[in-house]
Amino acid sequence: MTTSSAPGKVYLFGEHAVVYGEPAVPCAIERRASVTVEERDDGRLSVEAADLTLDGFTVTWGADGPDRPDVDVPTPLVEAAMGYVDGAIEQARDAADRPDAGFDVTVSSEIPLGAGLGSSAAVVCAAIDAATRELGVSLPAEEVADRAYRVEHEVQDGQASRADTFCCAVGGAVRVQGDDTRRIADVPTLPFVVGYDGGAGDTGELVAGVRALREEYGFAADTVSAIGDLVREGEAALRAGDLEELGRLMDFDHGLLSALGVSSRSLDTMVWAAREGGALGAKLTGAGGGGCIVALDETDGAKTALDYTPGCEEAFRAELDTEGVRAE
């Protein structure tokens, strides 16, 4: 039996624009997904997921297995969750040259599913690492990241970037632009506060919506490019440890993302509550449409404001996690 974990992440800057070759800066946070695997000898795959903000499910698939778990939750989330685990196991089988290996898999997570905190990337990275080690193979974090990206690319119909999977695999703050992935050294302490509305956006639908806008309107394409320019300014501020400038740029980024139609009333409400509570800056994180916002605040003000904001189901501090995927 082997267990691995990987951190979730927030986007400091760059979601959506990263799909079009612009840079992005995601940061790993100290909330983790853990995957435990144990090899079985019948070649089948049994998966138990108790706390991915679903009602929990156990399902066995493979030869003669069911098509999907019978649970009362949105079909796209369940099918995506199954696709991520399936893909991760296939990558582990390939890495270990054990195409017929079967597994009992247990997934547990502190990261809300579909909320913009990298739950799928964390689960995929942890599953690949645990399953390969169960088969006697140890992969470097960079290879875990690459294989996890292939899984997300497949499940998300070719619309994934390397940002989430690379960040969850290597930890810390990273810069991603196309296939160029690197960790940013000497990052200051980042006092993140996360607000969660209890919902989840449909990543594929939101990415497709931005794509349609970008193709129809030149100013939407310019907005995507402007996010890329903002990321470059933000990376410089991050390296300089200028938290006030980071906050201003986070506010600006949220406005650009809102213009692209990926915010929501609940996200905007939480962003404004955090700012009015004294945050240096606040923005949505991830695909949008619901889920989470991230604020930068060294005081208790933003979290307190979010605690009393209607529609905010949970608010919590989320320190930068300098460790990526690891054995537990």
Image (tube, rainbow, N blue to C red):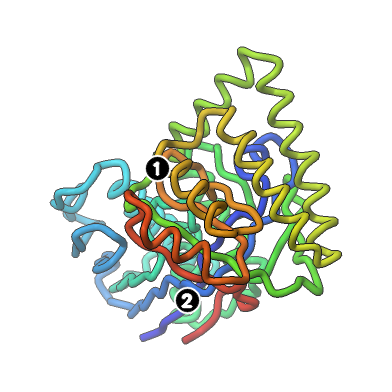
Q: Nearer the viewer, residue 117 or 304?
A: 304
What label does residue 44 carry, if any?
Answer: none
Q: Residues within 10 Å of mark 2 (few under 14, many from 20)?
A: many
**In the rendered image, which quarter contains the N terminus?**
bottom left
Q: Which residue is denoted by mark 2 in the rendering?
A: 5
Q: Residue at x 33, y 72 (%)?
A: 108
Q: Amino acid at mark 2?
A: Ser
The reply to whether residue 99 is visible in this rendering is no
Snapshot quadrant of residue 113: bottom left
Task: Tell me if 260 is positioned left or right of 235 in this view.
Answer: left
Q: Residue at x 50, y 28 (%)?
A: 208
Position of residue 166 measured from the top left corner of the image (x, y, whole percent): 63, 61
Q: Residue at x 60, y 41 (%)?
A: 254
Snapshot quadrant of residue 144: bottom right
Q: Residue at x 37, y 70 (%)?
A: 109
Position of residue 93 measured from the top left corner of the image (x, y, whole percent): 46, 66
Q: Amino acid at mark 1?
A: Ser
Q: The residue tagged with tag 2: helix, strand or loop?
A: strand
Task: Tell me if 265 is positioned left or right of 27 in this view.
Answer: left
Residue 191 to residue 80: above or below: below
Q: Residues within 10 Å of mark 1 (few under 14, many from 20)?
A: many
Q: Which residue is denoted by mark 1 in the rendering?
A: 266
Q: Nearer the viewer, residue 123 or 148?
A: 123
Q: Nearer the viewer, residue 124 or 113?
A: 113
Residue 16 to residue 71: above or below: above
Comparing marks 2 and 1, which lies closer to the viewer?
Answer: 1
